Image: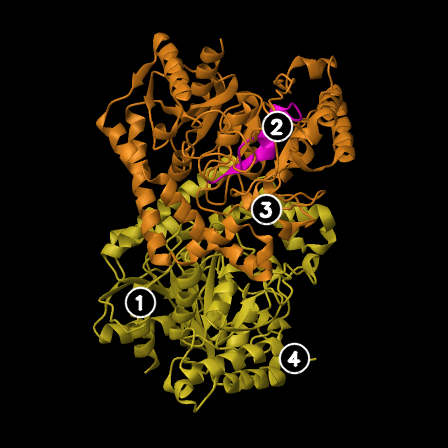
Chain colours: A orange, B yellow
Amino acid sequence: MVAAEKTRATHALRPYLPATRDFASGKDSQRAFLDRCLAAIAQHEAEIGAFVHLNIEGARAASDGATERWRKGEALSPIDGMPIGIKDIMETEDMPTELGSPLFTGWRSGRDAAAVRALREAGAVILGKTVTTEFAATEPRGTRNPHDLGRTPGGSSSGSAAAVAAGFLPAALGTQVVGSLLRPASYCGCFGFKPSFGGINRGGSHDGLSQSCTGVIAASLAECWVVAREIVLRIGGDPGHPGIVGPADAVRPTPPQRLAILRTAGWGKASDAAKAAFAAALARLAKRGVAIVDSHADLAAAEAAIADAQSLTKQIDGWEARWPLNVYRDRDATKLSKHMLDRLAAAEALGVEKYRALIAQRAEARRIFAKLAAIADAVVTLSATGAAPIGLDSTGDAIFNVPASFLGVPALSLPVLAESGLPLGLQMIGFAQQDAALFGAAAWVASELSA
Amino acid sequence: MVAAEKTRATHALRPYLPATRDFASGKDSQRAFLDRCLAAIAQHEAEIGAFVHLNIEGARAASDGATERWRKGEALSPIDGMPIGIKDIMETEDMPTELGSPLFTGWRSGRDAAAVRALREAGAVILGKTVTTEFAATEPRGTRNPHDLGRTPGGSSSGSAAAVAAGFLPAALGTQVVGSLLRPASYCGCFGFKPSFGGINRGGSHDGLSQSCTGVIAASLAECWVVAREIVLRIGGDPGHPGIVGPADAVRPTPPQRLAILRTAGWGKASDAAKAAFAAALARLAKRGVAIVDSHADLAAAEAAIADAQSLTKQIDGWEARWPLNVYRDRDATKLSKHMLDRLAAAEALGVEKYRALIAQRAEARRIFAKLAAIADAVVTLSATGAAPIGLDSTGDAIFNVPASFLGVPALSLPVLAESGLPLGLQMIGFAQQDAALFGAAAWVASELSA
């Protein structure tokens, strides 16, 4: 048992720049890097609980192969040899996929999900499956926040964020349908990337909802980008979507001229300290010449359009998740949480006509939000109402994350704010299919605010 | 062994009107109907090969339950008790799902696909899994055409069409990404319905491509509609799509004022007899007051926009199907057909940038086609180049079917034409999300041409 008192992780976040000369020159090696990750895991995983499964032997072998390729100048990609974690709702050939549900204990699909397959083609080392809440929804599965073991890491990509924060991994895949990438990234002090809807191929990932996206939680913005980019180059986005392809140098800092503040329905729930940290950050950016747009008719219209995003999203997700939850409930209802059963019952009362109205309303909100591209380069808000809440019974409130999910637009959480010494993310939201542009602006903002 | 000479099936197509008074009055019963289906199967399945698996005991029990419900006036839906076949790329709880591939021999997911689940909620009797080509592509799996055992039933929904044509079932689910519903419907003399893209929820169906749709092959237009409608009322369309909901009386004949002829790239490959049958049908409709639009700038633009649809579709599908085929190839390449391996190799040479250009071109074609709604109530063309080709090595040419798939619009094949005494479909193509309107027009056309 781990005491619930604050036990700050001692690992500094370690930016992993796989294409640096260290690897090419042989001063460092992919295998040596993996071994440092494994050492951190051996030391801290028991108290953090970021993983459901590890394939250490497989990772060592893959890492040795990568080390050899880098030595010969034959690296498969910039992420050849990068240890990566996979949220446990994505299928892996060599490890079970348990979806955070006792209904799937030990289940093996026998195949890699599309994104996992692409990562392996790029040489990445698939080290383990990271803890997810039940079916990537809200029921927590015990992972602790490395910055304070008595606090939640957030969810549903709980293990991915905790593993990166603890220095177990430089990057991990997660998914977000409401706030499952950006909230844990904020609570754990990582960078989090929720792509434009459809940005990363979800084949073999059990998150087929209409707002759901595969994304990346990483120790640096560069890693968020390079991991996403290398996947999409090999397997594309969802079928019918262009996928988030952009230049390798998308993270070159590009000062935004105008940033618009979107307070969202979360503002009323945010702590005073969080609001103060946000205001201070914006003031610094303003001082550096960024025009802060805080009052505009189009901005007010966007706020109104997303005011009910959390409730609308809950209804949309519920209807869409009805299958396969109804099948699973009939198989063994005792293996679903009460929350999940309640959600299913609500969905069964909704009906397809109501659902059509909901997605029509969402489409209208997207049209309204898109107009903001004319008045700002990106939108900024908080990533969470404050630092990670105390306790492991809840993964916290996604209210600040739901707008980008609802709108289908790219969003990043930058670990540049703090509350009482604990991490807090600044969220930047971009425009549909403009993920690369968002990274450029975010790289500049992160650099300015970290300086 | 079955001789390859012409052996016309003796079963007349039997319209199954589940909500008729026969069931309600007790003069006929769901169970008696099922028994007639089972008798036809016992007599002819050995020579036709429409099924991969049958669950006869389960079907009898389900049918008895439905019979009892109808007797009590407590039928769950108009299709309560309707025996239905499921293309073997959709998961079923009680039967294996083998995807037409030796890689999946005996594979059981242990759950029902979304559409199957909805059918069971509506009381439908899931009688069996129907033969599909390998992964719903082109490699045939031996099913014979009930109208001539020496001919292909078409593909990839081979078993679904053959089962309906043979009187084994009143309706079966199929899927179409190129021409896999309408071509077999045409060859087998059934009604075939390919919905607007996203129209029927594909959860648990292994056809995630961006043109792929679940649809219905049935012995009547009414059954195509009622089966689709009852599914969508319960589980909706694909996540994020409105689904094809419309009134129960969508099949009330509604005379179209204008029908536009789209010759498509298929015209040059169509037989003279097929073209003559088409011309004769159109002449009959013109005589009944329908204006036939055969020359218009917007029509010419649409023809140009779809001229390369077959090649474009092949490239789009190939890229999208790359995963999981690459995973399966690496597992055991000897269990994939040469065609499938060639297709995968071509996709691996394509690249995401080329894919983006392809789907952008497709989006433009959709915009151009949509303009036709201003000049016609629906578009008409052939469903196939002619009657089913002789031989079982190929499932025929999908060139007349690819436009509706490429355009994402609803399409129906009506068994109202013939070539040398063999069935040939008249295809009617509608506009996106206007599936119900297409049914109304098609009901009138089918009635006029069958009179």
Q: Are tags 1 and 2 found on a single chain?
A: no
> Which residues, given as a range, are shown in magenta?
A153-177
* Depicted A439 relative to depicted A94: above or below: above
| Image mark 2: chain | A
Q: Are tags 1 and 3 found on a single chain?
A: no
Confirm whether residue A151 shows in the render: yes
Q: Are tags 4 and 2 found on a single chain?
A: no
Q: Residue furthest bottom?
A: B27
Q: Which mark is residue B247?
A: 1
Query: Which of pointers 1 and 2 indicates the residue nearer the eye?
Result: 2
Between B426 and B37, the residue placed more toward the observer is B37
Mark 3: amino acid: Gly
Q: Earlier in the sequence, mark 2 or mark 3?
A: 2
Confirm whether residue B181 shows in the render: no
- The answer to whether the residue labelled 2 contacts the one labelled 3, judged by CB atoms less than 8 Å apart, is no
* Depicted B137 relative to depicted B319: above or below: below
Residue B433 is covered by the magenta coloring: no
Say whether residue A311 is left or right of residue A439: left
Mark 2: amino acid: Ala
Crowd band around label 4 with a 10 angstrom C-alpha radius: few (<14), some (14–19), many (20+): few
How many numbered marks are there?
4
Label 4: element kind = helix
Q: Which residue is mark 3?
A: A204
Between B307 and A132, the residue placed more toward the observer is A132
Say whether residue A76 is left or right of residue B246: right
Q: Which residue is mark 2?
A: A4
Q: CA distance from mark 1 to mark 3?
A: 35 Å
Mark 1: amino acid: Pro
Residue A164 is covered by the magenta coloring: yes
